[in-house]
Image: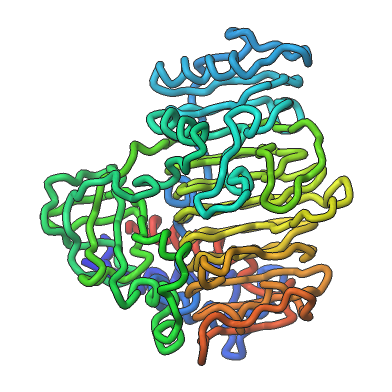
Amino acid sequence: MKGNEDVSASGMTRRGLLGGAVAMAVAGAVAEGGTAVAASGTVAQVPSLWHEFTRDPYRHPQIPYIGRAGFGGGAACLPRRPVVADVRDFGAVADGRTDCSPAINRAIAAAGKAGGGTVTIPPGTFRIDGLIRVGHSNVVLRGAGSGRTTLYATKNLTELIGPYGSRYGGDKSSWSWAGGLIWLAPEARWDSLTAAIRARAWPFEGWTGNRRDEWRTLTAVDPARRGDWSVTVTDPTGLRPGALVLLRLADDAGHTLLRHMAGDGPGPAAYTWADKTKLLSYVPYEWPVRVTRVHGREVTLERPLPLDVRPEWDPRFTTHVPELTGSGVEGLTLEAVQTPQQPHLLDLGHNGVVLQCAYDCWVDDVTVRHTDNGFGLVAASACTLRRTRVAGRGSHHPYFCREGSHDNLIEDFVIEERATPAPAGTQLHGINVEGLSSYNVWSRGDMRMGTFDSHRGMPFGNVRTDITVNNNGRHGGDASAGPLFGARFTHWNIRVTNGRAGLMKIDGLAPYSATVGISEVREFDQIDVPDFDGDLHGRLELYGTTGALRPRNLHQAQRDLITHLNGAGR
């Protein structure tokens, strides 16, 4: 059965269960006037959008369903894998002189050869003159805590691998938005990736390569609606529960897929898509998802569909490169040698932690310091970044999310105020999302600098919630990458300490968006105009209200619904 009317073991529909769960999630009696009495007795403001969402959570026009974002479909706890190696047994020494990167990589490789497990790094500072690679699934690199274990990186990626030019031409360095000194990516792709960089060619990035030709069809998919949890396929023989597949949607000559990502309607229909060459390079849209059940020709998925599935987009499930899954980095600080930040787009690659072609992976209790770019998601999906921090001399991208990254969760994150003044010619972005990346969540953040950087490439369905931000950054993005926003962007409970607008209040910019419970803001020097003409169907509610908003955190409230549904036997 499709959609949100599935029947539980108790005989109740999913919609009926949701109604009961929502009452508990709000934690108070909701009055007709839009207020709730919380457990503390204080009066809270409950937006009408929240009530609307609970009635149709998987297909709401403005608010995306992101309750299953992150590792394990939104799992509250991350795995604890057994310890199989200690880096000291492979030659690592916390003496400040020994290059420990070979020893750490040998320990990681040994864990991979053993089928997975945890590699421990004890307290102390370990010098690394090379990058650290996690290329095998189910391997965890774990320090003793971000305040106790430090990896001190003496070189950048330009020195270690070579100059990384841009496929878009010019003298830009792609280390400005790719690659990490701790790099999680499938081992099977590593040699081709580094060889291409050394040859000054554009290397593999996404799930099916830059030419998007490294795949084969598993089966065609019948038409379905956004929000469906199951689809009907032509041939289910190549599918099994637990398998990761790509849902591949190609665009047509009228760019109706891109128009659908923007919410459909007159505005997207009138928009000029054909000259947005960078945006067009991001399609077909590739969405990785696990199969949970195969029953005849009906296939149930781990998450509901992010878009409609229409025959004109040649929908199919396909293969992809072998994913990195079940791996993580925990409990350490990565500190780069302190050098001045480079001019915009000329970063040398003092980068932090990057997850690439990773699914169900994580980063927990990790700080990066003095990096060009902090934490990156590149064609990564269903990953969790938890208790992460960007500190030091200031970064170009503290966080970047690009190249079709979906369903990720970044929570309890901090961007510290820069320790040194910004050099001339540099730029600060913030929490970046671009390149048709969708259904990602940034939650419970403390941004002492930066901005909400929708970096063009029409990301859609993303949520920022329960964040305090000193909005002093600027968004970026090439004009050929097209719109800043697609449909269903949501900003929920955002506290802007300096009162600057700059992509905070988005009801006049983003189609079918929701801005709920945000501080009053004013325009400053970077003033954007909407990409689409006409009525954007953006919703603004409880403007100027933050502390009294209920629910305070949109992601947590949606995840609570899952808990109640599971408890009811979904």
Rendered image quadrant of residue 128: top right
Q: Position of residue 558 (x, y in %)?
A: 50, 64
Instruction: Specify whether 176 is left or right of 197.
Output: right
Instruction: Specify whether 498 is left or right of 12.
Output: right
Instruction: Report the label total.
Output: 0
Inspect this view and state whether residue 79 appears: no
Instruction: Give the quarter of the figure containing the N terminus.
Output: bottom left
Looking at the picture, tell me which residue is in the foreground, 436 or 19: 436
Q: Position of residue 21 (x, y in %)?
A: 46, 67
Instruction: Specify whether 59 is left or right of 511.
Output: left
Rendered image quadrant of residue 155: top right
**Residue located 24% across and 44% down the image:** 241
Instruction: Give the quarter of the figure containing the C terminus.
Output: bottom left
Q: Position of residue 135 (x, y in %)?
A: 46, 29
**Residue located 75% across and 62% down the image:** 473
**Residue located 67% across and 72% down the image:** 503
Looking at the picture, tell me which residue is in the foreground, 400 or 149: 400
Q: Position of residue 275 (x, y in %)?
A: 45, 72
Q: Residue furthest front?
A: 170
Instruction: Specify whether 22 is left or right of 348.
Output: left
Whether 202 is drawn above or below 125: the answer is below
Inspect this view and state whether residue 149 appears: yes
Whether 126 is drawn above or below 78: the answer is above
**Residue located 70% across and 82% down the image:** 543
Whether 384 is drawn above or below 99: the answer is below
The scheme the figure's colours follow is: rainbow
